[in-house]
Amino acid sequence: MRNLTRLKSLQALEASARHGSFVGASAELDVTPPAVGQLVRSLEDWVGYPLFKRSRSGAERLTPVDEAQEALEDIAQGLDLLESGLRKLRGRKARSVVVVTASQALVANWLMSRLEDFSSKYPNVDVRLDVSDRVIDLAQGEADIGIRCGLGTWKGVKSTYLMGEEIIAVCHNKLLPTDREVTAGWIAEQTLIHDGTPHPGGDFPTWSEWLARAGANQGPADGGLKINSTAAVINGAVAARGIALVRKAFVAQEVGSGRLVHLMPEVRWPVKWAYYVVASSKALRRYEVNAFHDWLASGVARL
């Protein structure tokens, strides 16, 4: 016979350990911090020893003791299974929600057109997009799963490689010369759009570096348009404001439609940054999050 009378206390323990405080757990469980603390203390009374090492300062004021840490994985899995069972009780009409975070440029130029494929395969899973250029804290549950471009080394999450990336030069088709061939020298004379977004460790080229590889005898013309937003750089190219160095994945649709033209495609500049689908181990235990992860990782979203 199962004894589930301490279910609320176990929820309080698991949430408090994950957030590192009763305050964080209270927001998730929709009760007051003192109520969370009382639930945890009742569990401590039952087991006969403190479950947390408590400190007065720091972002995480509660640290599970060794015995609690060993038990928490089983407790978390059990709570996830209970939630899954409740969902099954609701039957086929039940809908799940997965919150996906990605940058503005990636959502607008790559992900949005692919979501219909996911929805057709998982009709009972609703996708909510958290569009943000800042790195959302997935480990603390700000979103369920994310698509990030970088070196793949983010703490607290599992990173699965999706695809590589390279930098290409593009411009609106109406900027193309009618009386001469597109060369590195011609590009150097045009209005160039410079992306000032930081890309630490990515080996992203400057216009001077790209033109040198392309064989230009001179550097870029003075001036140009300097923008600190990748999405705005792409918008500037689409608006025919100049020639831009951009991530190939971000402009694939525009190049495919012919509105943007890939200039001198023989000049290749692969970068160290790549695209990864990232999520915490806890989030991946949920059906809807795991489904979105596997859909991306399978390569379906690259079509």
Image (spheres, rainbow, N blue to C red):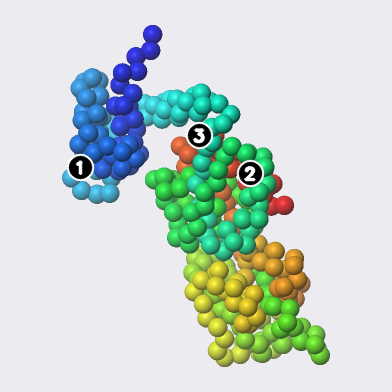
Q: In 3D space, how far apart are the residues under numbered discs 1 and 3 (Cα atoms)?
A: 30 Å
> Which residue is drawn at the image coordinates 71% and 73% (left, top)?
260
How packed mark 2 is, by other alpha carbons closer than 10 Å (few <14, some 14-19, many 20 or more), is some
Query: What x and y, as percent, mark residue 175?
Result: 71, 83
How packed mark 1 is, by other alpha carbons closer than 10 Å (few <14, some 14-19, many 20 or more), is few
Query: What x and y, as percent, mark residue 108?
Result: 59, 61
- Determine which quarter of the picture holds residue 182: bottom right
Going by the numbered disc 3, the residue's amino acid type is: Arg
Please name whichever residue, 24 or 123, is drawn nearer the observer in this view of the structure.
123
Going by the numbered disc 1, the residue's amino acid type is: Ser
Q: Secondary structure at mark 3?
A: loop
Q: In 3D space, how far apart are the residues under numbered discs 2 and 1 (Cα atoms)?
A: 46 Å
The residue where tag 2 is placed is 119
Q: In 3D space, how far apart are the residues under numbered discs 2 and 3 (Cα atoms)?
A: 20 Å
> Which residue is drawn at the image coordinates 69% and 68% (left, top)?
254
- Determine which quarter of the picture holds residue 170: bottom right
Query: What x and y, as percent, mark residue 126?
Result: 55, 43
Please name whichever residue, 208 or 113, is drawn nearer the observer in this view of the structure.
113
* Residue 272 seen by the camera: no
The residue where tag 3 is placed is 285
Q: Nearer the viewer, mark 2 or mark 1?
A: 2
Q: Secondary structure at mark 2?
A: helix
The residue where tag 1 is placed is 55
Of mark 2 and mark 3, the one earlier in the sequence is 2
Of mark 1 and mark 3, the one earlier in the sequence is 1
Which residue is the extreme one toward the top? Answer: 1
Please name whichever residue, 192 or 127, is drawn nearer the observer in this view of the structure.
127
